Amino acid sequence: MIPKKYFIVIKESDIEKYSNPNKTFIEVLDDIQKGRKYDGKLDHKYYIINKLEPYANLVWDMIVHWEIIRSREKSCGLETYENDDKYKKVDEFDIFKK
């Protein structure tokens, strides 16, 4: 099963930095995409979890676990999270192709 795109996530600070809230929604999205590309920022993709689902706490615990590891590595100057091949970005649908 390939996950479908149902939501758009926008950082409020991106609207303030790259666009104008008085523009149409499509114009705001276009401004943000162009501004982030100009700044060399990635086009992030997010998973949204319904907190009422029985697996929500498990997903949250996994996120917190990896954020703690990344934080500890950075504080020690290791930064292996970004530089280690096992953490390289993979196509988000790879897990569903097996």
Image (cartoon, rainbow, N blue to C red):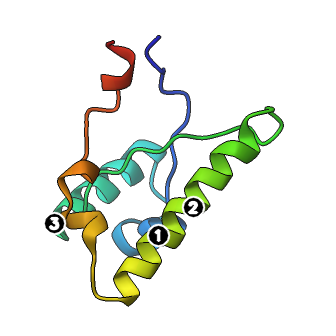
Q: Disc 2 vs disc 1: Cβ atoms closer than 8 Å?
A: yes
Q: Is 57 situated above or below 40?
A: above
Specify which label sits upstream in the sequence, 3 or 1: 3
The CA span between labels 2 and 1 is 6 Å
Do the residues bearing badges 2 and 3 touch, measured as CB atoms within 8 Å?
no
Q: Position of residue 33 (x, y in %)?
A: 28, 53
Disc on res. 69: 1
- Which residue carries the number 3 mark? 38
Across and down, in percent, residue 77 comes to: 28, 88
- Amino acid of disc 1: Ile
Which residue does the image show at 57% across and 61% down from the upper left? 65
Residue at (37, 24) in percent of width and height: 95
* Numbered circle sitting on residue 65: 2
Compare residues 88 and 10 and report the one nearer the observer.
Answer: 88
Q: In terms of secondary structure, where does tag 2 sit?
A: helix
CA neighbours of label 1 inside 10 A, class few (<14), some (14 to 19), many (20+): some
Q: Residues within 10 Å of mark 2 (few under 14, many from 20)?
A: few
- Residue at 60 percent across and 62 percent down: it is 64
Q: Residue 53: x, y in percent?
A: 79, 32
**Neighbourhood count class around disc 3 (C-alpha, 10 Å): few under 14, some 14–19, many 20 upward:** few
- Is mark 3 in CB contact (under 8 Å) with mark 1? no
Residue at horizontal 43%, vertical 15%?
A: 2
Q: Amino acid at mark 2?
A: His
The residues bearing labels 3 and 1 have C-alpha atoms spaced at a distance of 30 Å
Residue 57: % across, % down: 75, 46
Q: Nearer the viewer, residue 10 or 42?
A: 42
- Mark 2 and mark 3 lie on one chain; the one further toward the N terminus is 3
Image quarter (top left, top right, bottom left or bottom right) of the C terminus: top left
The kind of residue on which mark 3 rests is: Tyr
Front-most of residues 16 and 85: 85
Disc 3 is placed on an element classified as helix
